[in-house]
Amino acid sequence: MKNEKLKIILICFLFCFCFSILSFFLTRYEYNQYKESVNCYVYSMIAVLQQEYPNITEEEIINIVNQNGQMEYRETFRKYGIKEKDSILYKMEDNYRAHLIISFGFTLLLTLTFFTYFLLYFYKKEQIIREITNYMKEINQRNYTLGICDNGEGELSILRNEVYKTTLMLREESENLKNEKIILKDSISDISHQLKTPLTSILIMLDNIIDNPKMEEETKNDFIKNVQHQVENINFLIVSLLKISRLDADAVEFKQENIFVDKLIKKTIENVSVLKVDKHVNIEVKGDTKITFLGDYHWELEALTNILKNAIEHSKENGFVKIDVVENPMYTKISIKDEGIGMSKKDLQNIFKRFYKGEESSRDSIGIGLSLAKKIIEKDNGLIKVDSNKGVGTTFEIRYMK
């Protein structure tokens, strides 16, 4: 608003300045015309006097010209038959009238120009305010498709741009809300589907135990172990879904700390030690594990554990899983390669999708571990990709950008 006031004051000053300059030159022009007329008139008088009275002295002529007394010129004009309108005085009066008309014309022109400018200025200002008001009404009706971006520098242009930025933000939030609703709907549907099978199995086994009090102890123990296994699967599913939900909602604040790769890999291998022993899988670590990278240790441990667990599950008995660490100026790379059955092209395209189970997945697989790992790595400024050959093995490559 301060800039607008300065602009108006400057325009008023320029208007007054221009008008003063024009009035000055017009007045000077009229004065010069008046002086020229009087000098010509005096010169004519002197010429006549010298012609009619050759003996008249210069002193007498000067006294006549400089005479200040009041003269009744009308009687003299009538005496000699001179009409008043033919007098040089009338010519000077005509010039004066012309000067007044010209001055008034210029004043009127400048006034109209000034008035027209402000009329257009305030009309445009009112139009912009009306446009912004209508736009705000549209926003209140949740219509975020309009755009009023303005590249001007005035106060209203700044206001329009701020409203436009707010609209973009609201539009983005609206789209995110729609996407979140879709994700929530899909997640609820997936959770319902994933929980339905184990819960049904648990209910069937418990019903069998209750309905058969004389059931053999060995069979009963098998049912109880199976129930326990299903409960563990449900617990893992719920915990994983809660973690993914927190990541989807950006409710997780990732720490930026120095993670020592050797410590991270050792802890990851420790987390899957039972599974490694059960399948008799050997794990080899190569590369410089003394290096560090920035990230959140807790969440990266979760991600790498899920990836290494998947590699062991798909490895052959007495097979090898190789972990390779490489560092360059751009990123730190950790590769996890197994010598298992590999994946089909279809599995490669969908392997990171939530609840997706590959063609060779185990019966107990939920299909959420790799999805969670990818979400964690990408949220923590990393990249993950997978390469696989059927019957040869699969390689997961994680890059932590610097």
Image (cartoon, rainbow, N blue to C red):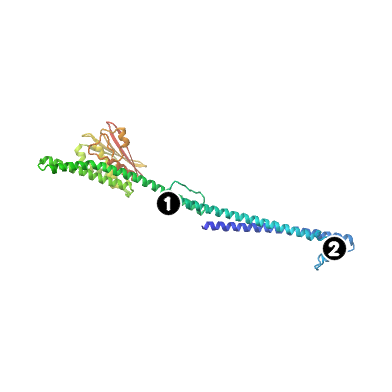
Q: Nearer the viewer, residue 158 or 53?
A: 158
Mark 1 Cα shell of 10 Å, populated few (<14), some (14-19), many (≥20)? few
Q: Is residue 83 left or right of residue 338?
A: right
Residue 300 image offset from top left, x and y in percent: 29, 45
Q: How many marks on residues? A: 2
Question: Which comes before the other along the chain, label 2 or label 1?
Answer: 2
- Residue 18 lies in quadrant: bottom right
Q: Do the residues bearing badges 2 and 1 touch, measured as CB atoms within 8 Å? A: no
Query: Residue 303 sits in which quadrant?
Result: top left
Query: Helix, strand, or loop for circle 2?
Result: helix
Residue 59 in the image, given as x and y percentages of width and height: 85, 65
The relative height of residue 383 versus residue 342 in the rendered view (above or below) is below
Q: Amino acid at mark 2?
A: Arg
Q: Which percent across, then down, holds residue 182?
A: 34, 44
Q: Position of residue 394 (x, y in %)?
A: 28, 35
Tell me if residue 261 can be seen.
no
Q: Check the picture and name the quadrant holding the C terminus.
A: top left
> In the rendered structure, which amino acid carries the disc numbered 1?
Asn
Residue 78 — which label? 2
Give the residue at mark 1.
140
Tell me the tag on residue 279: none
